[in-house]
Image: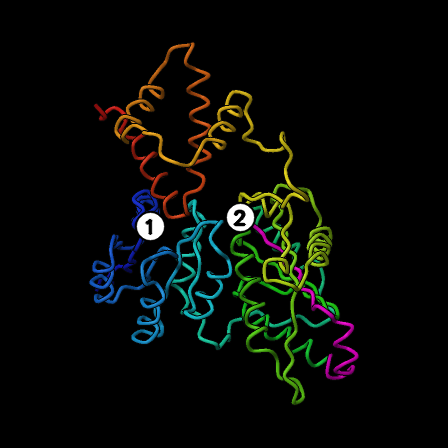
Amino acid sequence: MAREPLSVVIADPSRLGSRVLEQILAPLVYLIPCRDSAEVRAALADNPDLLLVTHNWPELDTLLADLARQRPDFRVLLLASPDTDPSRLASLCEQHGAGVLYRPFEPPQVLREVLHALASPPDSGEHETATPPPPEELAGPELLERDLAFCRRHRLSLSVIALRVDGHAALALELGEKTLRDMEWLLLDTLSGRLRREDSICFSRPGLIVLSLPGTPAPGARVLAHRLRRQLDEEGLEVRGFQVYPSLLAGIHCPPTTEAATPQQLIDGAVALSEQGLADSDQQAIVLSQAALDQLGLQQEPSGPAGPGDREDDDPETTEATAAEEEAPAEDTGQPDPETLWRSLEEILRSGEPNATSTRDGVLKRLVRVLGRLDENERMILVDELLMASTQWNEIE
């Protein structure tokens, strides 16, 4: 008797994102793409096996809460971008046992995360398959060496997270040696229970724990760090009758798998990053290496205000016009209607005359700056429309 195919619901108004997922997953599962809440509710009524839903879906919290109440074992993957708020993602994952799948959708990562979600139920608080913490005498870089070789062979991402207990020396004085040792072993056990089967605690010493996350890119590592910090801040650890709330500082290193770095160098790099963390805020407590920032498409924060020539978008041909625009009076001086403005812009962009090149380039650069102010969902829709238009160029006019 033939088995019914696994069914996956894709709740994402982004046409391009849904199409990419459909092309990757169609050979393996039966897909149900949805564009609005009514379609999602109808699809979920047929008891599918997995839900892929964008993180900014309308009333997402209510949808996930209803699923948790009606089908506690149902599996969900959130569709997000590297610049999505990691704290919100961590909260959603923690509350609803969801996973995260990041754009741009790469086939190996999509297949890995979807098959992993279909093969195991969501986090239910019981971590029977979690990797146990290694004995102190066996902890070392050899575990990371194994993961590094695996990721190089399969061209997967690797993340190394160093978790440092903030104020470890003060805790030693406050709790005493025996209680502190019990707290550290309980912390190891708790962290181990939050990891996947393939993840591991590859190194530990008093006040420091290093995690190896094969197949996990920088966005996923950052969300995990937020989840671990959130759990300890909210729940703490009960040690010998004391409720202890250790604060963790995290250093995240995501080296290119082609980089000729030894496992010990990767551990040392992540540990050095954790030493830069500050416990004042959730963002300052998590420090990322330049390689991790590159994966996220971010840059290190500048040390001071930018000077006149520090911005990348400064252009001699447009600086004067931009300054004049910023100094212009705010009141309405009889501007033309939007249709007239658009026709003027369209003429500039269509112009192929040599003497119009500088004007056209200046307009394009200023458009990029303006469009950069859109929120994440608006940018996704805009990119979808542009890419769809580029594939249908011959059909336009």
Which residue in the protein does label 1 denote?
A: 25
Q: How many marks?
A: 2
Q: Splitting the image into 4 quarters, where does residue 116 fall?
A: bottom left
Q: Is residue 157 magenta?
A: yes
- Inspect the image, locate mark 2, and give the three-letter code of the amino acid beneath it: Leu
Q: Earlier in the sequence, mark 2 or mark 1?
A: 1
Circle 1 packing at 10 Å, graded few (<14), some (14-19), many (20+), is: some
Q: Residue at x 45, y 21 (%)?
A: 361
Which residue in the protein does label 2 denote?
A: 156
- Give SS at disc 2: loop
Cα distance between the residues tagged 2 and 1: 19 Å
Q: Splitting the image into 4 quarters, where does residue 72 fall?
A: bottom left
- Quarter occupied by the C terminus: top left
Query: For the magenta stretch, what is the residue range?
Result: 156-180
Q: Residue at x 73, y 79 (%)?
A: 181
Looking at the picture, tell me which residue is in the foreground, 229 or 323: 323
Looking at the picture, tell me which residue is in the foreground, 207 or 354: 354
Q: Is residue 158 magenta?
A: yes
